[in-house]
Amino acid sequence: MDKPSTTISDLKKKRRMNALISPTLHEIKFNEFVLFILEKKMGTTRRAFLMELARRKGFRVESELSDSVTHIVAENNSCSDVLEWLAGQNVGDSSRFELLDISWLTECMKVGKPVEAIGKHQLVAKVSSSASPSDCITETPPLATKEVSQYACKRRTTLNNCNQKFTDAFEILAKNFEFRENEGICLAFMRAISVLKCLPFTIVRMRDIEGVPWLGEQVKSIIEEIIEDGESSRVKAVLNDERYKSFLLFTSIFGVGLKTSEKWYRQGFRTLDEVKADKSLKLTKMQKAGFLYHEDLVSCVAKEEADAVYLIVKEAVRAFLPEALVTLTGGFRRGKKIGHDVDFLISDPESGEDEQLLPNVIKLWEKQELLLYYDLVESTFEKTKLPSRKVDAMDHFQKCFLILKLHHQKVDSNRSKPPPESKTHEAKNWKAIRVDLVMCPIQQYAYALLGWTGSRQFERDLRRYATHEKKMMLDNHALYDKTKKIFLKAESEEDIFTHLGLDYIEPWERNA
Ligand code: CTP
Ligand code: MN
Ligand code: MN
């Protein structure tokens, strides 16, 4: 087929190029502003893009720092960074410029006209980045970084991550080391991620992280690279790594861990389609379910779906034990809006413990055709045993890992909207959801709740803190005081924090 000689996109491209070359092509609407966009820490391409955009919206943007410039817009620069740069420009009194953060320009672009430059936009001894969440402190960290505890259980970590740019990079590196079964380095990166998540400001220069624990030389060099170049070459290399890419695919299947991934990788498989195509492969029951519901399971659970599952679980449990407590735990209890599964803790104050509950719930759901997969694990708890010494030990509660069929209608009715009519009878009107049910005796409820709320890093550090700072042993069942040789009773999570001599940390502050 012949291509038309000039397409609309060609024309647009030409116009864009023209705009870059000859700024006067755009009508200037806002004469009181003469902008200069600082290239430092922004890069040529992004600067050119922003200049073009602003000009198109009717702003006057100078390419050079001419006498007429009134406003300087910078990104990822603190006030002192800009002043330092200005000092080298030989422009005389730099106080005549208004120094603004990129967030000001972004807002102007959004509404197509200048917005008032208020405090948050002004670079007055401030560091700010348009990408940082609004709750991040934008003042130069005063800082107290030396007071950031090495223990996640002594830090308050909300979901407002000011340093996602860095933590995302480290998550990739940590995963890569996990895939290579290099636990030491993996843990080092996890600790760095965890501590970065609690900082209330965005890191813009190395000085900001002086005294912060768990940031070793390796971690620091990557942070520096990201500050300077906006990305890390090591992360880029990992993202292109064949083993990493295959392991990421394989482990996305429910029931596939490092061992199976390693085996498949050695056998030469690289994609899930290649694995699926090999009919001679022996899959476990769990992996079969994993492949069958893969698409639903990787799409993540939304809070609305978790709430709908909560109603289903509560109804089923209460059918057998009307007084039972059913508590949403895991990430959703920490306030997350999405998760990979939905976790519940169940306990019955009346009977103390009921081994028949989970089997009964399973039978009920099977009858209702809601159960797509389940694995019931019986309790292995022994009352006399001391809490486990391992930081990552599995607990001994009776539990059930399952995949539940959640009808869309249940989610929609929860949102109090009328359910959408299914057009054809074949249309799938449900989603497979991973659910964890844990049954615990009421005396251990507080410990189980604390243990199952997470995050994993928070739990690890609670145990590490108990062992190293308090000579106590903590797990999901109990807290043992080694000096006094007694088990400490707790009715609530607050009691446990008190036993450990820790300030209470709310569930939504445990996103370490
Ligand atoms: N947990 C545990 N023992 C297990 C599995 C989980 O003690 N065998 C605890 C962990 O402390 C974890 C919490 O239960 O923090 C929830 O586990 P999980 O569902 O894997 O993680 P979430 O934090 O809920 O994250 P996601 O949103 O991905 O589900
Ligand atoms: Mn979970
Ligand atoms: Mn879980």
Image (cartoon, rainbow, N blue to C red):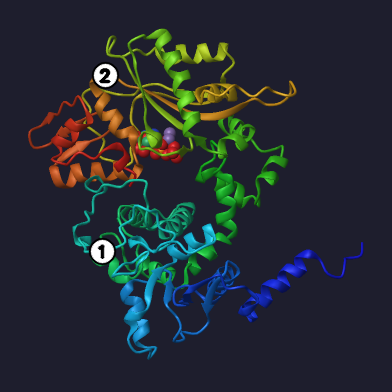
Q: Nearer the viewer, mark 2 or mark 1?
A: 1
- Residues at discs 2 and 1 in contact (Cβ within 8 Å): no
Q: Position of residue 453 (x, y in %)?
A: 33, 34
Kind of residue at disc 1: Pro
Label 2, residues with CA under 10 Å away: few <14, some 14-19, many ≥20: many
Which disc is residue 442 wearing? Answer: 2
Give the quadrant of the N terminus: bottom right
**Relative to 272, is 381 on the left or the right?**
left
Visible residue check, residue 93: yes
Q: Quadrant of residue 500?
A: top left
- Vertically, is 25 above or below 234? below
- The residue to which callout 1 is attached is 141
Ligand 1 within 8 Å of the CB at mark 1:
no
Label 1, residues with CA under 10 Å away: few <14, some 14-19, many ≥20: some
Residue furthest to the right: 1
Q: Position of residue 95 (x, y in %)?
A: 32, 80
Residue beneath the point at 40% across and 34% down:
332
Sequence-first disc among 2 and 1? 1
Residue beneath the point at 55% across and 60% down:
239
